[in-house]
Image (spheres, grey):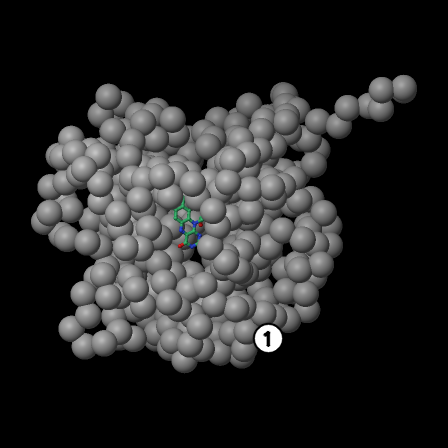
Amino acid sequence: MSIDDAINFEDLRKLAKRRLPKIAYDFIEGGADDEIGLDRNQQAFRDTPLVPRYMRDIDGIDKKTELFGRTYDAPFGISPTGLIGLFRPGGDLMLAAAARDANIPFVMSGSATCTVEELGETAPEHGWYQLYAARDNAISEDLIRRADAAGLSTLVVTVDVPIHSNRERNARNGFSRPLKMTMETRMDALSHPGWLAGYLKNGLPMFSNWLPYAKPGATADDIADLVSQQVTAPLTWENVARYRELWPRNLVIKGIMHVDDAIKAAELGVDGIVVSNHGARQLDRSPASVEVLPAIVAAVGDRMTVMLDSGIQRGSDIVTALCLGAKFVFTGRFTLYGVTAGAKPGATKALDIIGREIDLTMGQIGAPDISYLGEDFLYKPLPRNY
Ligand SMILES: Cc1cc2nc3c(=O)[nH]c(=O)nc-3n(C[C@H](O)[C@H](O)[C@H](O)COP(=O)(O)O)c2cc1C
């Protein structure tokens, strides 16, 4: 199968898997501990059926969506994912360019392998920046200042990595600092020539945003050391209040799962939250984000923009999240597999697949535009004793 033949998430996942050595593929696909959360994220969508309405005019389905005063062509964007350059050299900016061309937002990771300045050049209107707080506040504040100077509209602060999680695939594969390269890992790399050629040409990808904070002449490895010393960092509501003072435009907190945390964020003047369990990569025993979404929307939906990610593998998952009250939805692995498998055309392919599946679902349920999506489509079984 080639990227042109891919018709769904699963095809993109298989193509990405074929391109990557196991150590890299497992880093993307893996969850924490027993990986219960990965299944739960999908099952929660599957357990939420949509009830179709018929005899409506659904000609010319329109999925344009307003978010923070801007109209995007679709109700979804690209979640921040770190280390993209390891899977596809230049992949961060390929995703950014694909998002720009599709008129949807792209969130650059705090562990990106390009800089905010490059993002500002590639996708000034569609690029958002995700911050991982550094132990040294001066670094966090400088990153925020640089994202502002690059003209980016939205700062996303990820709060669900208080400590690193237990990812056992990484431990078994030797994907750690320092990297443990066994004979098996080397042989595996040799049997993935497409990936290997990119790696040999470009070398180890660099967390280049962090270059100014490293010692002069720092290598990619030195910078990776710096990042691992600085992140994770203690992060409290005081930090969020400070970021609110520093950041003049849309401030989003990513990783909120509890109603009271959502309320606190609203009280601090945060513009939006992404309800997310980090794609089941942090707390394995977390509920699916879509399970906690309705209560959060009920508590703060009229005060701030509630968005969602984690577990999106079909356009119908996005439609379901919107029916449950999310204003916007993000995808992590879906688009990451696209760019890994097929560079920028692969990223565009992923966006096309998702967009088409959203159109099909909206057509099937009788929703000509996004404003129709709501609880009317949610299946509410009568109580058993009725
Ligand atoms: C390989 C990988 C790297 C990630 N890196 C980051 C990151 O740097 N910052 C962040 O906030 N979230 C990161 N995430 C989490 C995503 O932003 C997102 O929450 C998650 O992937 C959504 O779940 P999904 O992959 O099922 O769509 C990462 C996820 C993956 C798969």
Residue at image location 45% in from the left, 63% down from the top: 232
Residue at image location 37% in from the left, 43% down from the top: 170
367 vs 13, nearest the viewer: 13
Q: For the N terminus, give its image quadrant.
A: top left
Residue at image location 29% in from the left, 62% down from the top: 224
Tally the marks.
1
Instruction: Name the residue that disc number 1 marks.
Output: 238
Q: For the C terminus, give its image quadrant.
A: top right
Residue at image location 60% in from the left, 41% down from the top: 285
Give the answer, above or below, for where 248 lies relative to 12. Answer: below
Asked if residue 21 can be seen in this view, the reply is yes
**Image x and y of residue 27, in percent:** 35, 42
Give the answer, above or below, for where 184 lies relative to 205. Answer: above
The amino acid sitting under disc 1 is Glu
- Quadrant for residue 376, please give it: top right
Q: Residue furthest right?
A: 385
